[in-house]
């Protein structure tokens, strides 16, 4: 894998229900990680606003080498995160940042621009 393949993609724009990640596509929600990303389909793991992001949602981010993970809470901060997610990330030595979606995008893009191996889960509605 070359350095470019390991670079975490930047998020070009985010608005209600729509995100644009060049090289990855347009979608409502995204899983991003070093080397790429894809649309985040909550039905794959049964994710709901409560209890929220689960360990199962993190697999690709961790397996693709994310050393920092940014979790968005949604535009109205209605998406929660299960407590065991924080326990797993802490035990794995992975730094986690949690913020409202626009703030999460800013944090993620800032980290990605430095070349850090950052991953993230982004929800562009509530």
Image (cartoon, rainbow, N blue to C red):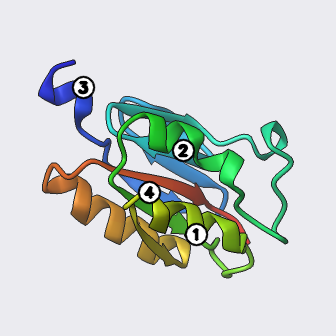
Q: Earlier in the sequence, mark 1 or mark 2?
A: 2
Residue named by callout 3: 5
Residue named by callout 2: 31
Are the residues tagged 1 and 4 within 8 Å (C-beta)?
Answer: no
Are the residues tagged 2 and 4 within 8 Å (C-beta)?
Answer: no
Are the residues tagged 1 and 2 within 8 Å (C-beta)?
Answer: no
Q: Earlier in the sequence, mark 4 or mark 3?
A: 3
Q: Secondary structure at mark 4?
A: loop
Q: Earlier in the sequence, mark 2 or mark 3?
A: 3
Residue named by callout 1: 87
Give residue 11's position: percent from left, percent from top.
38, 51
Are the residues tagged 4 and 3 within 8 Å (C-beta)?
Answer: no
Which residue does the image show at 84% across and 61% down from the upper left? 48
Which residue does the image show at 35% across and 40% down from the upper left? 65
Please name which of the two marks, 4 or 3, marks the residue nearer to the observer. Answer: 4
Q: Secondary structure at mark 1?
A: helix
Q: Give the Cα separation between the discs numbered 1 and 4.
A: 9 Å
Which residue does the image show at 66% across and 48% down from the upper left? 57
Q: Give the Cα separation between the discs numbered 2 and 4.
A: 19 Å
Are the residues tagged 2 and 3 within 8 Å (C-beta)?
Answer: no
Residue named by callout 4: 92
């Amino acid at each position: 894998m070359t350095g470019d393949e390991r670079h975490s993609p930047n998020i070009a724009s985010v608005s209600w229900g729509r995100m644009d990640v060049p090289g990855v596509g347009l979608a409502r929600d995204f899983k991003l990680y070093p080397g790429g990303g894809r649309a985040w389909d909550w039905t794959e793991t049964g994710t709901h606003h409560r209890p929220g992001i689960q360990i199962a949602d993190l697999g690709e981010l961790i397996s693709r080498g994310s050393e920092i993970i940014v979790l968005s809470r949604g535009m109205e901060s209605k998406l929660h995160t299960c407590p065991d997610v924080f326990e797993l990330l802490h035990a794995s030595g992975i730094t986690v940042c949690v913020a409202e979606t626009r703030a999460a995008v800013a944090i993620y893009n800032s980290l990605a621009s430095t070349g850090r191996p950052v991953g993230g889960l982004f929800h562009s509605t509530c």
